[in-house]
Amino acid sequence: MSTMNMRDAPPPFIPGLELSRRLYTDVVRPLLDEAAPGVPHSAARLGSGSEVLGYDTPRSPGPSRSPRLQLFLRRHDVHRHAGRIRHVLASHLPKTFHGHPARDGVEVTQITPWFVATLGFDPSAPGDIGPTDWLATPTQLLAEVTAGAVFHDGLGELAPLRSALRWYPHDIWLHVLACQWRRIAREAPYVTFCGETGDELGSAVAGARVARDLMRLGLLMDRRYPPYGKWLGTAFARTTTGHHLAPVLTAAVTATDWRTREKHLSQAYEATADLHNQLELTDRVPQDAPPERFTTALTARISNPTIKELPPTGAIDQFVDGTDVLTRPGSTRAMYRVTHQQPSHGHRE
């Protein structure tokens, strides 16, 4: 290999979370001890980015392969020390770290404002996280704060916050599952209807939508927040039944005639129904029962009357499908309130 080829060769792949951990341990922590000795902090890699979900590869875009992290300080320490810390980091962080840009990779902030900006609410506020907090927050955003990695939790706050957000409360989970089955119930008949009227393209589109809903349902059953479309297939493959259902759903979405498409989707329905029964969330529902039966069975098990009476729309990304909205927690909360005719003042429902 020529000298030029060796010089141009890309650095060996290091997963983004590991790269961020090394940046913190090898560089940021020593600089922090110099800039603000004795000041407690927490350090983590949370938020947006394929590496946070563990999906980055050598082909990931540059930002996902560059080390990044959040450095959390207490509120009064932000006012006292953040300026000095930022100055030291700006002066001493290397331009590159293991071959990747690193100069702007550290965000100095505090926990509450960061979570509010990321989720749209403060999960550490007094009282339980309310139904609106859960349902108005896109699952992608919940995944971004519960995945990733905490490198140091000197403030002792990140671990309990992430634990509280790890998964839906039981009744919220039942509600979201019921609404997902309802989505399938409403869409599934179009696969046959379009096919019988000679609209194979319409049938194929409906079949793909049902397959997507079944994938999201499989993730919800597996207690995993469904990510946005780019990583939906990757996440689904890691679920309990993903390895079994993926070939069936692939056959459904690639079928060229509606009867074949319907046959494969029927197999997927029955496998998903079997998983539902294994969870024992409701009385047993026959595997060949229509999707509405699962919605009814799940709703019947919700004990909280407030949740039981919610409109059957579910979480925000079960009835809104626009990236420009779902990446903005303020927009999703406003849309959820409008849809559910809720007041905009700040009490926790």
Image (tube, rainbow, N blue to C red):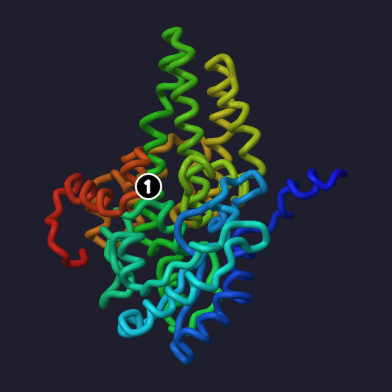
The amino acid type found where label 1 is placed reads Ala
Q: Return the residue at label 1.
A: 178
Q: Is residue 99 above or below residue 10?
A: below
> Which secondary structure, mark 1?
helix
* Residue under the image location 33 percent in, 70 percent down: 123
Residue sitting at 52 percent across and 50 percent down? 277
Horizontal side of 54 relative to 214 (left or right) equals right
Q: Above or below — where is 69 with respect to 178? A: below
Q: Quadrant of residue 41?
A: bottom left
- 120, 3: nearer the viewer: 3
Q: Position of residue 258 (x, y in %)?
A: 53, 16
Task: Give the residue furthest to the bottom.
Answer: 38
Q: Is 344 placed left or right of 198 in the picture?
A: left
Residue 199 location (% of width, % of height)? 44, 11
For the point 16% across and 65% down, which residue is it?
346
Q: Relative to the observer, which residue lies in front, 327 or 134?
A: 327
Q: Residues within 10 Å of mark 1 (few under 14, many from 20)?
A: many
Of all residues, the one furthest to the right in this rendering is 1
User: Dividing the image into 4 quarters, which one contains the C terminus?
Assistant: bottom left
